[in-house]
Amino acid sequence: MPTIVKKTLPYLFFALFLSGLFLSPTFYALSANAPRTISLIFILSILAIFRPQFNYKLKLNKEFKVEYLLCFLIGGAFYSLGRFWNLPLMQPEMDWRDFVYACLILPIFYEILFRLCLWSVIERMKLYKFLPLILTTFSFTLYYFYPLFWGPHPYKAFIYFQTMMYLIMGLWWGYAFLRERNITHVFLMHIFFQIGYYTADIWKFIGEL
């Protein structure tokens, strides 16, 4: 591959990714699954082009890290805070399949998309050590904020709350990946956060027994 192409591709892919985020309302109007389908195409494209240059570990730690417990507790705390502020939390009745999707499949999908693929693209720009952390966190947060681009939204307050929540957590997870380069560690942090968030009402119910 020519050198000029190698240098240009990361910028091109990042521009395409941001364009996809801003065009998500248009894609969503065509199909509810369109934004994630396009994200999957982006992941596969990155894996096909940049996979040999990825710098990460896929390693399961033998000991239970305190960050997992903290993520679980913070997830529950955010949910409780939203309830305290009487926010419409956009959490319908969930069966076990919805729970597995929200707490296992989506966290892994998002971490592969942002902390692995998009991170690797930005890292190849070779501009600034913390640039991947900053831009992937910005993009990750924007992914939760873009429903406001659709216009008036009944869950406006919740979207602001969710954006703040994932900005904080995105910075933490991104820093954890920058520090350890272990994508499995970040998978588990995100998964435990989601479990803490979606089981917060269960713990409240148990406490009232």
Image (spheres, rainbow, N blue to C red):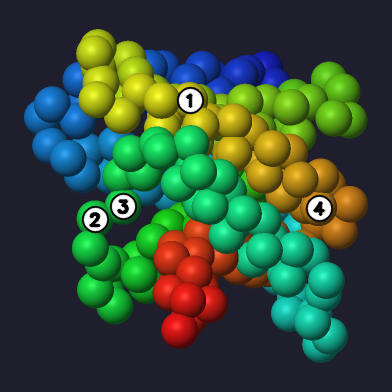
Asked if marks 4 and 3 touch (Cβ < 8 Å), the reply is no
- SS class of the residue under badge 3? loop
Mark 2 and mark 1 lie on one chain; the one further toward the N terminus is 2
Given residues 79 and 109, the one toward you in this image is: 79
Asked if marks 2 and 1 touch (Cβ < 8 Å), the reply is no
- SS class of the residue under badge 4? helix
Amino acid type at image mark 3? Gln
Amino acid type at image mark 4? Ala
Q: Which residue is mark 3?
A: 91
- SS class of the residue under badge 2? loop
Label 1 packing within 10 angstroms: few (<14), some (14-19), many (20+): few
Given residues 134 and 95, the one toward you in this image is: 95
Q: Which residue is mark 1?
A: 160
Up/down of 107 relative to 34, above or below: below
Amino acid type at image mark 2? Pro
Q: Residue at x 51, y 17 (%)?
A: 15
Q: Residue 152's spot in the image, x, y percent?
A: 24, 13
Asked if marks 3 and 2 touch (Cβ < 8 Å), the reply is yes
Q: Which residue is mark 4?
A: 176
Q: Residue 120's spot in the image, x, y percent?
A: 68, 41
Label 3 packing within 10 angstroms: few (<14), some (14-19), many (20+): few
Up/down of 193 relative to 141, above or below: below
Q: Residue 140's spot in the image, x, y percent?
A: 55, 35
Q: Residue at x 62, y 26 (%)?
A: 138
Amino acid type at image mark 1? Tyr
- SS class of the residue under badge 1? helix
